[in-house]
Image: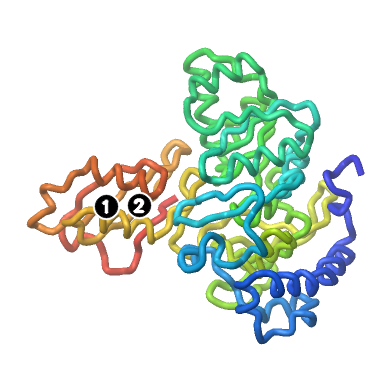
Amino acid sequence: MADYFKPEEALAPEQREQQLMAALPEQLSYAKANCRYYAELLTDIEVSSIDSREALATLPITHKADLIALQAKLPPFAGMTPRKPSGRIFQSPGPIYDPECDGHDWWRMGQAFFAAGFRAGDLVQNCLAYHLTPGGFIMDSGARACGCTVIPAGPGQSEMQLDLIASLKPNGYCGTPSFLNILLEKGKALSKDTSSITKALVSGEVLTPSLKASFEAADIDVKQAYVTADIGLIAFESVSGEGLVVAEDIIVEIVRPGTLTPVPEGEVGEVVVTSFNRDYPLVRFATGDLSAIMPGTSACGRTNVRIKGWMGRADQTTKVKGLFVHPEQVERIRRRHPGIVKVRLVVTRQQDNDLMRLLCEVDEATGPQLDIAAVQDSIRAETQLSGEVALVAPGALADDGVVIEDQR
């Protein structure tokens, strides 16, 4: 079907649901038989009888935040894979390790690129990182699945990237929306031509209304994709402003945080995904992200359910410039520097850029001698991001358990 990357995108909703539920018992049986983690987690459960959403909702949930401890006990993937991957191992901040195995469009990203208008023959500048984290490879594989040629640019070095755009004239961009904005603004300031870019698929950050408007003013058609390093593509935008269509070949539930229970349509809850990927068969995997199911189907003709997109975090973990920052990382920064009693990482947004500021409550004896530059180095070492440091007086930070305060 020419209008969709996969014919299944236009299936009648009842037919898709029937196919997913028919395939679910076999996938659960495979995970239980081949993955040490699921053999233990599902040991007393007759998985062959799990053939409905109601039955699925009785199974235990595995939280993304738990992977840090689980993988530390049994590296690299806590027994959640049937074998070591034949492709790559990535490290996301935490640290959390994620596999990529050999195979065409392994992350299932082709659906998102196709919906964003990418076609064979397009030249795409990919500005997500290829270093350690999987973002660059995820985007790369999806663009190539649509027949595009990819420039593996990665993030940063904006002047060099502008030279690439002027020379090679890519018509597509993929990466974070904030970096696309940086390229456009810097290109304007340096009189560098960026007009060849007419389409973009962005991920890793919220696409704010102001950024969306600036891209439209530059005649760039921008769509969003909701992607995680463990699941791959979860949902994607096909019609601007009408939510994100859930990808094929996964089951998405919106669950009340702290429970096993899916919430009614329209209510905000945590995104929980069951994947049919045999290389990494995640079962009821809680992403930590909040969203909600939207009524009806997309005007584009894709019939899968839609979600409202990213609506915050169910825990204090937050995403900054496309990378997750965990409370455990903030605590490790504190422990590196004697004299810091308590910390709070404050995340803000200025001019569509994410900013981090570490508030450090110091003791009176060693606080004045605290090496601010060394703390900034620790922030980068732990999070792969830069951040400011500010000293606050003893007792200034509330005893409210907040380690990461996202003010965006």
Amino acid identity at mark 2: Val
Which sits in the foreground, 16 or 242?
A: 16
The quadrant where residue 250 appears: bottom right
- Work out which quarter of the rendered image holds the N terminus and state it: top right
- Is the image coloured rainbow, by chain, by secondary structure, or in one colour? rainbow
Q: Are marks 1 and 2 in contact (CB under 8 Å)?
A: yes
Name the outermost residue toward the bottom. Answer: 44
Amino acid, disc 1: Leu
Q: Report the side of 190 relative to 139 (left or right).
A: left
Residue bearing mark 1: 359
Q: Position of residue 344 (x, y in %)?
A: 31, 57
The residues bearing labels 1 and 2 have C-alpha atoms spaced at a distance of: 7 Å
Q: Tell me if I can see residue 79 in this picture.
A: yes
Secondary structure type for disc 2: strand
Disc sitting over residue 346 in the figure: 2
Residue at 53 percent across and 60 percent down: it is 76
Which percent across, then down, holds residue 145? 77, 39
Q: As displayed, is residue 161 above or below residue 209?
A: above
Residue 205 image position (x, y, % from top left) = 54, 45
> Residue 82 lies in what quarter of the image?
bottom right
N-terminal of the pair, mark 1 or mark 2, is 2
Asked if 26 appears above or below 373 in the picture, the reply is below
Disc 2 crowd rating (10 Å Cα; few below 14, some 14-19, many 20+) is: some
Q: Position of residue 261 (x, y in %)?
A: 63, 77
Neighbour tally class for label 1: few under 14, some 14-19, many 20 plus, Cα within 10 Å: many
SS assignment at label 1: strand
Q: Which residue appears farthest toward the left when viewing the image?
A: 365
